[in-house]
Each structure stands twice: as C-alpha cells, then as structure tokens.
Image: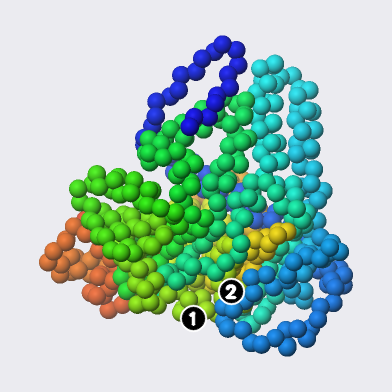
Amino acid sequence: MDVPRRTRGSASHVDPPTRFFPPPTRFFLVSRHKARHDRLAMHKTRILWCFGLSLLLCGISLQAARSEELEPKKNESTTDSAPPRSPLDVPINPVGPATSSATAFDRVTQHLDPGGSFYFYWSLEEIFGHLSAALTTARDRALRSSLSPNEKEQFIDKSDLVIQLIRSSGVEGLSAFGGSSKQVENNLYLTKAFAYAPQPSGFVWQTFTKAPHRFAALDFLPANTEAFGLYDINLLALWQALLKDLATSRIQEVVIALNEFARQIHSNTGMTVDELLGSLGDEAGFVITLNQDVKVTIPLPNGMVEIPEPAGAIFWTVQDDRLFDRLDEMFATNPTTQKEDRPDLRIRVIPGAAPVEYIRPTLAKLKNYLIIASNDKLVRNFAESLAGNAPTISTVAEFKELAKDVGDSGNMAQYISKRFQQTYYEALWKYMLASGSANDAGVLEWEKTLYDLLKDWAAYGVGVREPDGLYFVRKETKNINEFLGQLLTGPAYILFGQEARSQTASSNDVEPTKKEPVDPATLDAIRLNLQKIADAKEKALKARHQRKSQPLVRTEVEKYLPGWVESVVGETYEIGAIGESPYATAPVDIADIPAGTKITL
C-alpha cells in the first residue's frame, strides 16, 4: 500500500522507476599522499572520540564513594543461605520489581555492585526529559536568521520531523543510568549497567516488549563459534510506529522514499511491508565460526593474510514459509543451485568458485529459523548440534566460565572469544602497518598497544528488558579501566606525532636533510629471506598435481623451509600471489625506504 504523498501548490511529481538492484559501486583512485592524510585524519577522529568518552566515564565514576555511602544496606545473608546454582542457572531479574518508594537512584544502584574498580550513577532527567522542548527552542532561534521563506519552510519541516521522532521514540522517558565493574575471579570481571525509565513508552520500547526468556539459539550454535549476537526485536511494531510519523511528514523526499521502499518490497517478495515483517518472528541473530583445521588466505589491499577458515550466518525466526519460498525462487534462477529437503531442514546452496571455494551462499530453513549463511557446512553443523549429535557453544570451557555469572536468559546476548579477537586484530594490524607511513608511526604505535589489549579480551553479556528499564550484565577477561587508561593516552600520541613532524618540516625548510645511504647488510638479509621463501614457494607449486591456479597458503610453503624466516628489523613476510614475488614490509624506515613499503627481490 502506497503512503499518501503531500504536495504543495500544483507541482506534480513523477515517481522514479522501480529499481530492483542497487546502483553499481563506484571506486575512486586517490593519491598515496591523500590516502595517508585521510587515514591519519581517521585515526585522530577515532582517538579523540575515545579520549572524550574516557574523560566522561572517569569523571562520573568519581561519584563512587558517595554512591556507596548512600546505597541502602542489603541483606548479606541472602546469598549465603541460597542453594548453589548450576553454571547457567542465573535469575533473569535478580533485583525484582521496583517498590513504590524507590527513587531513581535506588532503582539504578540496586542493579550494581559497589566496591569494585568502576562505579557511577548519572541522572538524565535534565538531559533527556526536556530534549524535544530544547530542540524546539533552538529551531525557533535559528529561524530568526536571514533565511528565505522557502528555506525557512524546509528547515521547519525537517526539524519538526526530528522533534516528532524524538517524542515518539520514548527516549525522553529515560531518567537515569548507572554502571559498575567488579573483579569476581582471577582475571574475570563482572560489568553491570541499568537504564531506568519509570514509564517506558514509544517505539524504542515497543520494539523490545518480549518477556525475558532462555536463548533457544544456544542449542544449535556449534562448538567452534567464536562470536555471536542474539536479539529480540519486533520489526513490525517498529515499522508501524515509525510510519505514523514519517507518512505524515511534509518532506516530499521522505514520502517518496517510503513509497519506493514499499514498491521494492512488493516487487521482490510479492508481499506488502506489513506482510513481510509480519511473517518474521521476534528473534534474530548472527554467528561467526573459525575452523582451526583449515587455513585460508584473505586478500587485503597490500597482499594476503592467512587465517582459520571463517564462516558466518544471520538468522531470524519466521512465522511461515512465505519468505523462504520467495528467496528459494530467487536461488532457483541460478542453474547450479543445489537443493535438499528434510523434515526439519530445507537448504539451498550455490557452489563456491576459486579462489574462495569455502564461500558457498546458502539459504536454509531449520525448524522455525530462516538462515542465510556463507556456506552449507555451517548450516549442517547447526542441524547436528540441534539434534544433539555435535557439541554446542555451551560446552566450550571459555564460554561456560563467562556464562557462569551471567546466565542464558534475557532479551539480548553477545559473545566474543579470545580466538576471534586474536585473528581479527592480527589481520587488522597487518593491514594498518602496510598502509601506514612513517609519519603515522606514533598513532600506529598507540593502535598496536590497543590491539594487543583487545586480543586478550573475551566477553559474554546479556540484556534484560524490565518493566522500568533495561538491565545489562557482562563477564569479561579485562578490567574496563585498562581500556579507559589506554584510550586516555591516545591524544598524547597525536600531539607528540604532530610535534615531531613539525620539527622535521622546520628542519627541512632550513637545511635539507641528507638521507643516510641504504644499509646494504639489512636489505641483503631481508632479500635473502625473500629468496628462501621464493624457492620454497616454487617447490610447493611443483608439488601440486592439480588446482595450480588456486592461491597458495603459507602452510604449503612452510613445508619446504626448515622454519619460517626470522625478522631482521621487525618486518613481516608474505608469500604473495601465484606469479608474483614474495615481499616484506618493515615497521620502520630503512634509510630511504619508507616504513610500510613493499620490499621485493
């Protein structure tokens, strides 16, 4: 059903043709200097934002002493007298409903743990309670400027829409927020937070109205799951709430976009937006796995990186088969699509192609879950785990330890393992090191320290919808203050780096610096290592009897080396693609060879 469009005057509008596919992505080439400048600007922005957040959290955490003094005394004998709980037998709402006499401070701090390394309470009534009124005042003041009548009208329409969305969202009902972090075991910390809204209303809250429950998806997530997210979300309620405000907007572009969106949905699915969203359930999630037994190479702008074979999937509960049947028709347009139908599993697979055969786009319906995955092996692992024929994530030692004080019930859950963190940040560091420059050395050094901290971080947390707010609890392997301390040092790296570059530039303006000659011994040692890799690479290719066009991985080359080559100045080595020479990248300048520049034979 089309959304009615409002028009001004007699001007007519011609709807744009329905677009079934997104416009092609456009790529632009930029100079190496500009690319480095953009990267440095990105680093600065990210670090400064982190610095601001760190200052904010550190400032409000100074209320800890006052909070502990004002916090009501709790019955300390309750925990001791309670029977022991199983590892995941944690109450969904350990605090219970609010009493009529409870203040915002009481309600928030009841959910927190005093006596830890991090504790704060933040009253938000003066910030969010009058947000729409403050924005209305700001809008009226802006209208006093020298805008044309048409510009004023457009400004009013846009600001009114923003103000109305804020009012409808329910964020103005948020009264207080608090958080705490406390060490509960050796190198394990329990972080809690509570957002208090005494009378929650609006589409933000309507979207998350489901009662807390056990996460059923834990029954099919396989043991090699390294990250997942589970969420309760009612998209139909969100869409209908937003539509009330957006459909009455006086901004023509918004109304046209809504009509176009509705037509796109109907053209591609044969359903209206309400029918499509109504066919979806209210539980969704994603999962990422890593197969440690199989290594693959991932292309980066500066070369290849080897990681355990990844797989991923998104899934959503569905009310019926309509969406699956429509997607099944789309998959059927590919003649190579493979089909399999079982009582509880329907699966459609498009075979992979070199050099990424492990990516086989897969559509599946497992009981009441609609699944879109990177390969069918992951979906079959889901089915095996659900049937009890294969271990699930709940049997993994790291997850069990983290879940012991968190539980397996709520409305949202997120988990990330150390193995995933190590794989991701090692690959990211290789990319940043190769794409950075000597001028970025200070920022890169800071990021390297942050990455090293994150690589040793695992966490599992849940969010619980309560009648008067949202409660979050997370168990993790790092103290939150470690991250805050690292983030606070970010601006210093930027300032010191700028000062060093400024002094270098001034020195160059006065008297050009004569570059030192290339160190023959250093380069010779690096190139000797490259020659060893090249020889081993050639032997590995000759040993192949088939699939010689597929990319080599490091493990194949290492078979023909006594051991991986040793670094001379901290450089890293890549075997390179077939037909290309191996190369190395150094983290420091080697005389007139800038850091990050590829060194080849």
Q: Is residue 261 above or below residue 371?
A: above
Taking depth in this image into account, of 547 and 240 the one nearest to the observer is 240
Residue at the (75%, 49%) spot, across then down? 173
Residue sitting at 42 percent across and 75 percent down?
A: 392
| Residue depth check, mark 1 versus mark 2: number of the one nearer the observer | 2
Q: Residue 26 appears in which quarter of the rendering?
A: top left
Q: Is residue 577 above or below residue 566?
A: above
Nearest the eye: 31 or 509: 31
Amino acid tagged 1: Ala
Quadrant housing the C terminus: bottom left
- Outermost residue toward the top in this view: 10
Whole-percent x, y for residue 253 in the image: 55, 27
Q: Name the residue tied to disc 1.
A: 397
Hey, which quadrant is residue 391 in on the image?
bottom left
Q: Which residue is mark 2?
A: 407
Q: Amino acid at mark 2?
A: Gly
Residue at 79% of width from left, 28% of height from top? 141
Along the line of sight, which residue is nearer the eye, 107 or 289? Answer: 107
- The local secondary structure at tag 1 comes to helix
In percent of width and height, residue 106 lies at 82, 66
Q: Secondary structure at mark 2?
A: loop
Q: Is 555 situated left or right of 490 in this image?
A: left
How packed is label 1: few (under 14 Cα within 10 Å), some, or many (20 or more)? few
